[in-house]
Amino acid sequence: MENVIEIHGLTKRFGSFTAVDHISFSVRKGEIFGFLGANGAGKTTAMRILCGLSVPTSGGGTVAGYDIVREPEKIKRHIGYMSQKFSLYSDLKVWENIRLFGGIYGLSDREIADKTSEILSSLGMADVRDSFVASLPLGWKQKLAFSIALIHEPDIVFLDEPTGGVDPETRRRFWELIYDAASRGVTVFVTTHYMDEAEYCDRVSVMVDGRIGALDSPAGLKRTYGAEDMDGVFRILAGRALRKE
Amino acid sequence: MKEFLAFVRKEFNHIFRDRRTMLIVLILPVVQMILFGYAVRTEIEHARVDIVGDMSDPEVRRIVGRMDSNRYLDVQEVLPSTGFISSRFRRNESDVAVCFERDFGTRLRKTGTGHVKVVGDGSDPNSAQMVVNYVMGVLRSEQTEISAELSGSESSVAFTPSVQLMYNPAMKSAYNFVPGVMGLIMMIICSMMTSVSIVREKETGTMELLLASPVKPLWILVSKVLPYLLVSTVNFITILLLSRYMMGVPLRGSLLLLSVVAVLFVFTSLSLGLLISVVASTQKTALLLSGMGLMMPTVLLSGIIFPCENMPAALQWLSHLIPAKWFIIMVKKIMIQGAGFPYIIKEFCILAGMTVFLMTVGVRKFRIRL
Amino acid sequence: MWKYLIEKEFRQFFRDPMLPRIVIVFPLLMMLVFPFAANMEVKDINLVVVDSDRTDISAELIEKCTGSGYFRLKAVCDDPREAQEMMDRNAVDAILTIGQGFSRSVATGEDVPVGIKVNTVNGTKGSISSQYLSDCIMLFMRQFSVSGPSVASAQASVLQSASAPVIDAAPKYYYNAYMDYKVFMVPALMVIAVTMVTGFFPALNIVGEKEAGTIEQMNVSPVSKTAFIVCKMIPYWVITFFMLGMCLLIAWLVFGYVCRGSLWGIVLFTVLHIMVTAGLGLLISSYSENAQQAMFIMMFFVLIFMLMSGVFTPVSSMPAWARAITYANPLRYYADAMRAIFLKGSSVAELWYDAAGLLTIGAAVLFWAVRSYRKTS
């Protein structure tokens, strides 16, 4: 199977502090890849490098077939991104946000109109088309942000703790959207705090102190560490961390 | 009480952890004080004078030499004709042109009158008037000398009344502007610091936590103001030291009284900032209100640069609403005139009244939001 | 791509609860209120007279002074201490003391017991007040000695004698002959309005996106930094010219001030100035972590720009080191040029110096801003 992300010896230092320490891994096309780690373990830094937001100190790799050091701008055309800090414009209406991000990724007015009705009907949000994003409940905002991250049909979508602060039911429905995207061949790269969500992933990596402590399917990890669930796996691995938040 | 102290501690931590903001707040006033203390002044020195006239005429040369040796005037160029004046003005290369008529010296001796035209670039009326007055002064002293030479020493020394300059005999601009700059800087720093305090918690949603606690709203506000009060006090002390020892502004009155007035003014500014913070819905609004909204009126209407008594009646009324105006009046009276409390009682009461009013409105609005 | 970004900025601008109002109210305030406040003319000087002579002649002198129109007579009292007390309270600006025997000595012209005391906390005002008062007294003395019953004084004889040559000096003002302070301030106030709107609104805006996290979303998109920034600035530029037009219109309709030079000159200098302020706004936003810091730094610069540009007090009054600093102040060049064009009708060629100054600062600031503002870290 084809790899859409391949990383070798990726390192990022801030002064004397090594946030990401020689990590290497690859992500296959169409897979849901969970990226776990305690706060401060370096997962956000690593993800920022993959998205072309940050330049690695050493090491390298490719995302969607482009070099992360030399061609970050090309990568940006082929990825979608949704950050942990909710980032649609709250003073724009729902359709205006869709139009803006569609326009940024080079969609024509016509394509944007089609996408808008498609997104709104699939999310069941046609009624709030003219509402300000600020007035929507958090769960709706997150679903909308996810759909907008996919508006230009990217190869990979990066989700940075996408389901923070919502109830389990809303989270479950959000994951349905993720599955739906994956079934259409979009690779999903997701960081999360919730261990039950880790169970939904095809493969999971756990970062400890800037390194990758383990990488396998949830079932494989549970077998290796003799744990009942992902929570147990995580506790064993996170317990080895020297770095505290 | 225990909760209150906990709140105060929390606020202190919150504010002093943001090192960069702290640094900005403590350093900016010092830099501004130094810059403005020296640079904001209205004395004119080195006014640029152009001459139109025949420099081979000894009488013209004598007058031009006299001008050049005047410390306020710098003779720049001799223009061939008056036609060149306007283009020099348009390029901002000269402030005044002194035009001697043809054969000035000969005419002066023969017909008894020599004509001189003093042409000022009037676009800045005040500077122009001052510069033209300097030139006229030079011409007048030349006149006196000529008269004295001709009519012998018995000539009159024109009567001049004795003039006594009170409080600022050296007529230093600093005496006038430094108290103003003090007021301006304190006002803006204090109100801008506090203006975000409440609205920030509103934006991040931590306000609910505070409100759920058993501490009364008034005390929440007080705990927010306390750290800023400390910062402002430090600011006041540095500004005062600078103006006393660097700018050389005297402190003729009592330091204690000045401090009391300053603390009162800090309270006024802080409560204004708090009120803005309570009313504003976003940090941006709060900052625009406290920054832009306060700056222009304070600069223009508090008498820092432009005296309030010159303004039309409506604007004078408006200027009464500017807290900085009263502070500046009091500082001038205490520092320069050495006045005691009885002389500032009116201004003090007005400022105190404003503070109480702003505080009350702030607290009331804050309660309504509960 | 640009179309969508500009569309977004305009939408956000008009939806902001404050900004559109500021853009309307600010120039109105600037043009309709502040020109009246920014007035350095000295008049209505509060005067107290200590008259120990109490004769018709001393009353005539008082009459002469108050009749000049510069003074407002607050009180006539006998005790100099009372007058001093009034000055301490700031109730009066000047004290005129007329001593006993004034009416007698004025006739002989010797040892006239007249004294002036002025409050010089504000040096300019003090010196002008004392000048006015001295002028009044001297005028009175001269008239008195000419018309009076006494022997013509030596002073008068000099004036009347045909033998002494007289330098007849006539002062005249080339521009602004009526010495109108408002017309001097109007272009400068426009300058301040333009500076605030073009430099500081966009900076606050960018910091706002930083705080909201939306800038991150833009950074992972193919939108280039330049496109993002330029699209952010464009609405403010449009608004600036709208505002400038409004100011010029108000100046014409309300005060009857017409720009003497070419409007294109004004446009050109405004564009140059915008280049500087835009760069500065960017610099500020990239160096500050939150809106509060940005605003503090902005206020710092705005105040320095305003107070050290010659807008309010002349640059030539500053000490040499401060004058040197003003060479790095864009407002110095812009205000200078705007005043010259508006009041004197200077052409752009005549103001090449100001244009060069703005260009140099603009290039330096923009270069620095672009370098410091990177999309990646």
Image (tube, coloured by chain):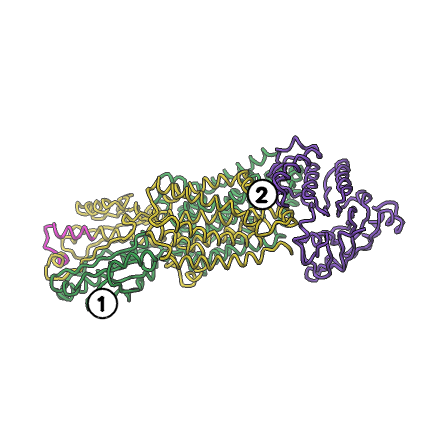
Chain colours: A purple, B green, C yellow
**Amino acid type, residue under disc 2 in the picture:** Tyr
User: Under tag 2, what secondary structure?
Assistant: helix
Q: Nearer the viewer, mark 2 or mark 1?
A: 2
Q: Which residue is mark 1?
A: B55
Query: x, y (%) of residue C331?
Result: 43, 54
Query: x, y (%) of residue C343?
Result: 33, 50
Residue in the foreground of this view, choosing between B350 and C310 = C310
Image quadrant in which the C terminus of chain C is located: bottom right
Residue C143 inside the magenta-drawn segment: yes
The residues colored magenta run C138-155
Residue C226 inside the magenta-drawn segment: no
Q: CA–CA distance between discs 2 and 1?
A: 68 Å
Q: Is residue C139 left or right of residue B131?
A: left
Specify the label residue C21 is tagged with: none
Q: What chain does mark 2 sit on?
A: C
Query: x, y (%) of residue A93?
Result: 61, 36
Query: x, y (%) of residue C348?
Result: 38, 55
Q: Residue at x 68, y 61 (%)?
A: A15
Q: Determine whether label 2 and label 1 are within 8 Å by CB.
A: no
